[in-house]
Amino acid sequence: MIPGCGMRQSRPTTLMNMHARASDAGSLSVCRTLVAVACAATSLVAAEPGAVVIDPPSAARTPSQQETMAARGFVRHRGSWRTAQEIELIERAERATVAQKEWNGRLERMRKRLEEPAHAEATAEEIREISDGFAVPALAAALAAEQHARVRALYVEALSRIRSPEAAQALVAIAIDHPDTETRILAVERLAAIDAAAAAGAILPALGGGDNGRINRAAAALGRLGARSAVGPLIDVLETEHVVVADGPPEGSTTATFTPSGGGLALGGGAKRRKVRMQNPQVLEALVALTGADFNWDVAAWRAWLASRQAPADFDPRRG
C-alpha cells in the first residue's frame, strides 16, 4: 500500500520511486496523480474507496437497427418501417373504409324501411338529411342499382347535401352517365344549385371522348347549367367523326363473286372499319340555348359568329 494514496502496487520498484519523488515534492496530491497515471499504464485496480481509477478506452458500440431507424424518424409498424405521417394516413384510410362499409349496411336497412308504410316518411327524411362524407360511395352505389325514380331522387338529394369533392364527382357522373333522363336532369339541377361553374368545368372533358352518346348527354348537362364558357368546345363537337365496324364475312373465309364478265372467288377480310361523321343533336340544342343563335349544322358559321363576338366566358348573347 502506498501511504496516502489508497492504492496497492504491483510493481514495487516503480511505485516506490514515484512515492519517493512525491515525498521529495512534499505533495500528497502529486502522489495521487502519479499513481493514477501508473494505474493506467500498468492496469492496477483500486482496492480501497477513494482511489483514482482510469478505465481503458472501450471500442465504439454499433447502434441497433431500431436505434438507427428511430434516429431517422421511422417507427416499426406492422412489420415495416414507416414515418409517423405514413402511419397516420394508413390508419385514417382504414377508418374511412370501415365507416364506408357501415354506411352500406345502414342504407340497406333504410331502403327496407322505405317499403314499410309506418316508417316510410320518416326514413325518407332521414335519407335526405345524410351529411356524412363517408356515405358517398354507399349512396352512389345504391343509386346506380335503384329501380325506383322516387328513391333515386332521395339519394341525389342526400349527395347534394354532402359538400365534398367526392359527392360532387358522384353527381357529375350521374348527370352524364345515368341511363334515366330524369335522374340526370335532377343531378344537373343539384349541381347548378351548388356551383354551376365548377360543375361545368367537371363535365367539359366528357365532350372529348369517343362515345357519341356521352358527348350528347354532356352537352345537354352543359346547356342546363347555362355554361356559356362551353360554347367553343360545343361548336367543336357539333359534328364528330367515329370509327364504326361493319359486319362482313369471317376473316379468312372465301366468298363467291359474280360480275358481268364471269364469276370468281375472293378471300373474306372480316369486319370492315370505316369512319363516319355524326351530327350531335343535343350539342346543337345546347348551343341554341346558350347563345340565342341558330346556324343549324353549319360549323363554319358557328365559328365565325363566335369569333365576331370575341366574347368572354360570361357574355350574354341577348345584349346585341
Image (cartoon, grey):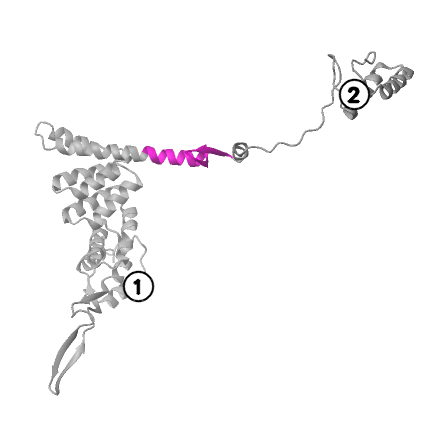
Whole-angstrom CA distance, mark 2 to mark 1, is: 99 Å
95 left or right of 160? right
Residue 235 image offset from top left, x and y in percent: 25, 61
Answer yes or no: is residue 295 visible.
no
Residue 203 image offset from top left, x and y in percent: 27, 51
Residue carrying label 2? 36
Return the mark for residue 16. none
Mark 2: give few (<14), some (14-19) or many (20+) Cα within 10 Å: many
Who is closer to the viewer here, 33 or 157?
33
77 left or right of 219? right
Label 2 or label 1, whichever lies nearer to me, is 2
Position of the C terminus by quadrant:
bottom left
Label tally: 2
Q: Hey, which quadrant is residue 213 in on the image?
A: bottom left
Q: Which segment did they paint magenta?
A: 73-95
**Mark 2 is on which residue type?**
Ala
Q: Residue at x 30, y 35 (%)?
A: 97
Q: Is residue 13 magenta?
A: no
Residue carrying label 1? 307
